[in-house]
Image (cartoon, grey):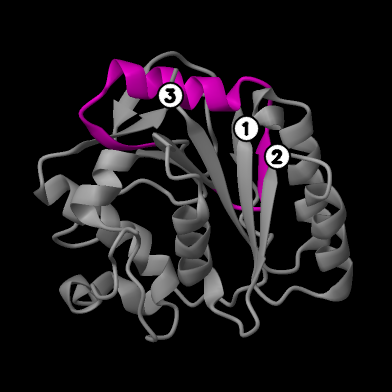
């Protein structure tokens, strides 16, 4: 059986974090390793995470200086157990229903050449099967899986690297698009899971967002510092 680890970057959003932790405990993710990176959250969110991690299969890491989403996520990925086979990255503003993790894993087993398996953003459906990712509104970069909840096999991270790290403002939003684009360039496939087992609120973590610039940005200039381990 594949070894799974769950990586979760956290910045404030105490209400969303509380709901996510409850979702973990009430699903098959309860006994799976979870790695939380606290990116300078407030006192209440920090206390909640520390209490949660104290008696579960969890790692808790704290950023002394705020690193934003991508660096925090990469730190969580790198901190996962070395024998991890499948990495699952989750945003704190996701509502996860029982079966959500098994659904991702079963989809990967059906599509072993995929670099990423994720849930659709927006209005999910409760259908069957998977849909190959296609995101036509970003010029020259059509292959894209939303970064709020997705599974990546270790080999894909080894071939592509972790997500792009850069100091350019808001580049953490573009990094998941760039990662998917590079995966497609290397011949990997990507799939959305047709299911309502994960619902993305899009209003949880309080990292600021200004997305207008990224649609005409030269993604190739962003890729740096992306070694896996």
Q: Position of residue 42 (x, y in %)?
A: 81, 75
C-alpha gap between disc 1 and disc 3:
11 Å
Q: Mark 2 packing: few (<14 Cα in 10 Å), some, or many (20+)?
A: few
Question: Image quadrant of residue 211?
Answer: bottom left
**Disc 2 designates what residue?**
57
Q: Is residue 24 left or right of residue 135?
A: right
Placement of 208 over or under 72, stated as above or below: below
Placement of 172 over or under 162, stated as above or below: below
Report the residue at 61% width, 51% height from top. 35
Q: Position of residue 87 (x, y in %)?
A: 44, 41
- Quarter of the image where the C terminus is located: bottom left
Kindly check if marks 2 and 1 are in contact, taking CB atoms under 8 A apart as contact: yes
Q: Position of residue 196 (x, y in %)?
A: 58, 27
Q: Position of residue 193 (x, y in %)?
A: 43, 27
* Most foreground residue, 28 or 181: 28
Q: Which residues are magenta?
A: 90-117
Instruction: Name the mark on residue 32.
Output: 1
Which of the two discs, 3 and 2, labels the residue nearer the N terminus? 3
> Visible in this render: residue 136?
no
* Most foreground residue, 87 or 100: 87
Report the residue at 60% width, 34% height from top. 198
Report the residue at 10% width, 40% height from top. 187
- Quarter of the image where the N terminus is located: top left
The image shows a total of numbered marks equal to 3
C-alpha gap between disc 2 and disc 1:
7 Å
Placement of 182 over or under 218, stated as above or below: above
Question: Image quadrant of residue 133?
Answer: top left
What kind of element bears circle 1? loop
Q: Is residue 179 left or right of residue 60?
A: left
Which of the two discs, 1 and 3, labels the residue nearer the N terminus? 3
> Visible in this render: residue 84?
yes
């Amino acid at each position: 059986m594949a070894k799974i680890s769950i990586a979760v970057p956290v910045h404030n959003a105490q209400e969303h974090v509380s709901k996510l932790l409850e979702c973990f405990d009430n699903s098959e993710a309860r006994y799976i390793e979870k790695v939380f990176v606290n990116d300078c959250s407030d006192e209440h969110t920090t206390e909640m995470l520390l209490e949660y991690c104290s008696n579960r299969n969890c790692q808790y890491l704290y950023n002394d200086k705020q690193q934003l989403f991508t660096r925090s996520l990469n730190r969580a990925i790198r901190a996962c157990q070395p024998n991890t086979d499948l990495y699952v990255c989750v945003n704190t503003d996701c509502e996860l229903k029982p079966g959500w993790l098994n659904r991702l894993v079963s989809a990967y087993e059906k599509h072993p050449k995929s670099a990423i398996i994720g849930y659709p953003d927006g209005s999910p459906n409760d259908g069957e099967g998977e849909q190959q990712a296609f995101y036509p509104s970003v010029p020259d970069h059509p292959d894209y899986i939303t970064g709020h909840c997705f599974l990546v096999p270790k080999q894909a991270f080894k071939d592509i690297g972790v997500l792009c790290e850069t100091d350019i403002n808001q580049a953490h939003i573009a990094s998941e698009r760039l990662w998917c684009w590079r995966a497609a360039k290397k011949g990997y496939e990507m799939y959305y899971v047709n299911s309502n087992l994960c619902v993305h609120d899009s209003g949880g973590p309080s990292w600021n967002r200004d997305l207008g610039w990224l649609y005409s940005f030269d993604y190739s200039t962003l890729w740096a510092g992306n070694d896996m381990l």
